[in-house]
Amino acid sequence: MKLIKNAKSAFWVALPPAFLWVLFFMALPTAAGDKSLVLYFPKPAIGRYCIIRTATDPMDDTFVRPDAWATGKITVPPGCMIHLTLNYNGGQNTKFLRTLPPGTLRGLICRDMEVDDKAIADMCTQKGLVILNLQGVDLTDEGAKHLSPLKDLRKLSICDTLVSPKGLAVLRNMPLLHNLNLSRLALGEAVDKPLEPLKNLFLLELTGTQLTDKAVIELPSFPKLQSLVLRRNNLTDKCIDSLLKYRTLRSLDLTDTNVTIEGLKRLKALPKLRHVTVRMKDIKIADRSQLKKLMPRLEIHDGSREQVVPTELFAPLH
């Protein structure tokens, strides 16, 4: 049963991170050819997996089988690959990934676990990966070097890791990247050169990366960029004009910055901008109305999380 029919129109608007990961399966040929691939996973289960049938158009991939425990015998039909989410057992047994045939894994998620650079090396033996989520693991600049062979990556998250701007040099080996999440890395003003080769980026997340106006002004020109997240950085109206080079931009998140209503008005020059996220309480109702008159198609979203958790936990940084 085809669970994802077509994700093209929905993907690039800002969505919850978990949902984005499900949508963004990229098409690659399976190593199994015309025969089913039989795998034997360890016990206890090393995580959850689902089987995906690849399509000619990367955004038309479909789920053949919903997720199940990754343990015991698993049969992968012809033309299909596996998307694997590791649990604690999987994080402690990454060497198993080295036993899988090349091209078995299409996507791999290993989030918020105490896995070191050696474990990352095990994961990167699956050189056909197009999706890799390493959010919150103990990845360092040295470990980031293991990502070099993953030249087919389309979606990568290394947010909340120990990677510095020096470690981002590995990105030059990933020219096909569409979606990149570097949130909460200490990047400061040294982010422009590592990102320069990424001409195919559609979505870039830089939440809480200690960016300044200068850093944003020096960001490379991404000719296909549609979604840019700059929340919780020390930014002002000075950086706004530099964003006008992103003519394809549809979604911009400026929550918890020092950008004012005057800066937001200048976004009128972006012909395709449809979504701006800010803290609503920082913008007067009259100013919101004025902004809507300038950009009738613009939707203004509230970046506050006050309805989910206590307000004081997410007080503005500035």
Image: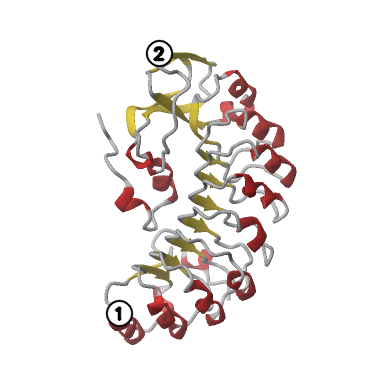
> What amino acid is at disc 2?
Lys
> What amino acid is at disc 1?
Lys
Task: From the viewer's perspective, tell me whether residue 167 is left or right of residue 25.
Answer: right
Labelled disc at residue 292? 1
Q: Foreground: 256 or 117?
A: 117
**Cα gap from disc 2 to disc 1, whole angstroms:** 56 Å
Q: Indicate whether 8 appears above or below 62.
A: below
Residue 162 in view of the camera: no
Depth-wise, is mark 2 or mark 1 nearer the camera? Answer: 2
Q: Earlier in the sequence, mark 2 or mark 1?
A: 2
Q: Residues within 10 Å of mark 2 (few under 14, many from 20)?
A: few
Q: Quadrant of residue 294?
A: bottom left
Q: Position of residue 169 (x, y in %)?
A: 69, 50
Screen quadrant of the N terminus: top left
Residue at 63% x, 72% y: name it.
212
Say how many tags the image has.
2
Check disc 1 and report its element: helix, strand or loop.
helix
Q: Position of residue 186 (x, y in %)?
A: 67, 59
Labelled disc at residue 47? none
Residue at 72% x, 46% y: name it.
141
Residue at 38% x, 64% y: name it.
250
Task: From the viewer's perspective, tell me whether residue 233 is left or right of residue 49.
Answer: right
Q: Position of residue 159 (x, y in %)?
A: 58, 51
Task: From the viewer's perspective, tell me whether residue 250 is left or right of residue 156.
Answer: left
Check disc 2 and report its element: helix, strand or loop.
loop
Q: Quadrant of residue 125?
A: top right
* Residue at mark 2: 35
Task: From the viewer's perspective, tell me whether residue 222 is left or right of residue 140.
Answer: left
Screen quadrant of the C terminus: bottom right
Residue at 66% x, 46% y: name it.
170
Residue 90 in view of the camera: yes
Q: Quadrant of residue 270?
A: bottom left
